[in-house]
Image (cartoon, rainbow, N blue to C red):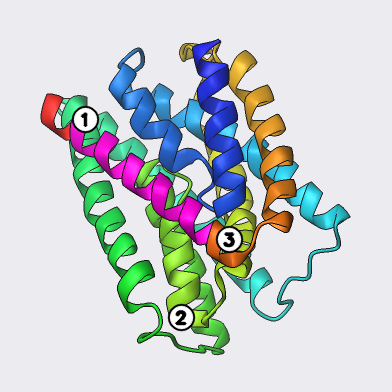
Amino acid sequence: MLYLFIALTASIIGAISGLGGGVIIKPILDAIGHYDITTINLLSSFTVLSMAVASTMRHYQAKTVFDQSMTPLLIIGSIVGAMLGDSLLTKTIEYAHYPQQVKQLQNILLLILLSIVLLYINYFNKKFQFHMKHRGFILFIGLSLGFISTLLGIGGGPINIMALTLFFALPAKDASINSLILILFSQASKIFNVFLNHDLLSYDLSMLLYMIPGGIIGGLLGSKLNHRLSSQMVKAAFNLVLLFTMMTTLYNICIS
């Protein structure tokens, strides 16, 4: 029931704010310490994918409008980036003498990136916003977001939000919705890559029986709430989750 609660809560908040849930799930699973780094990444990815599918379907039913010139390019880039990021992470874990060090490095990089995101969203987003339109640049941003999110095992929500705001000047709600779309395709790409290159039966994924339903229900509820909340409320949820995740990540760094 603990894992169902984690998946459900993270997915509701992730769907509301565009964080996706992975940035909440992974640090919490790291702190609980029941699984190794590869299993945690898989549990997080499957849960986040189920949340993103449910949330995207809800937005589709609500006829949410997407930028048809930008969003497809971001999606293509994120798919390629996710496959590259997963391959690099797999090789790093495979050749590392101490896999725990890889988890520690992930947490340090995550804390640095979350700190940058928090500062930008709250203090610099009005001063630094660009309206980039070049197709090659949009593809590059999508690839970078897919690569970083998969390498860190978080789904990429906070980094997606910052990049979409910084480079494309998207409002909070639009950025959150586009972030969920990127999370959907990057995580689907990562899991497809896992199916091709790994034996899933060698991992203990029994908790998915609880986490996937939590992700689906959370995605449906969160996306419904996203339509009802103002951009200011979405931003407030984003900040609260970011602060909680940063504290959890700092705890994981200290106890490792």
* In the rendered image, the vertical position of residue 96 relative to residue 244, given as above or below: above
Which residue is at 36% across, 16% downward? Answer: 35
Q: Secondary structure at mark 1?
A: helix
Q: Quadrant of the N terminus?
A: top right
Q: Secondary structure at mark 2?
A: helix
Q: Amino acid at mark 1?
A: Asn
Q: Secondary structure at mark 3?
A: helix
For the residues labelled 2 and 3, the Cα–Cα distance comes to 14 Å
Look at the image and say whether residue 13 sits in the magenta stretch.
no
Q: Position of residue 112 (x, y in %)?
A: 22, 54
Q: Position of residue 183 (x, y in %)?
A: 57, 51
Nearest to N terminus: mark 1 or mark 3: 3
Nearest to N terminus: mark 1 or mark 2: 2
Residue 176 numbered mark, or none: 3
Left or right? Give the position of 120 relative to 236: left
- Which residue carries the number 1 mark? 252
Left or right? Give the position of 37 relative to 235: left
Most common SS among magenta residues: helix
Residue 48 visible somewhere in the drawing: no
Q: Nearer the viewer, residue 213 or 140?
A: 213
> What is the quadrant of residue 191 in the picture?
top right
* In the rendered image, the vertical position of residue 51 relative to residue 131, given as above or below: above
Determine whether label 1 and label 3 are within 8 Å by CB: no
Q: Amino acid at mark 3?
A: Ser
Query: Is label 2 or label 3 in front?
Result: 3
- The magenta region covers 234-251
Which residue is at 28% across, 44% downward? Answer: 246
- Which residue carries the number 2 mark? 167
Left or right? Give the position of 112 relative to 18: left
For the residues labelled 1 and 3, the Cα–Cα distance comes to 27 Å
Q: Nearer the viewer, residue 21 or 140?
A: 21
Q: Residues within 10 Å of mark 1 (few under 14, many from 20)?
A: many
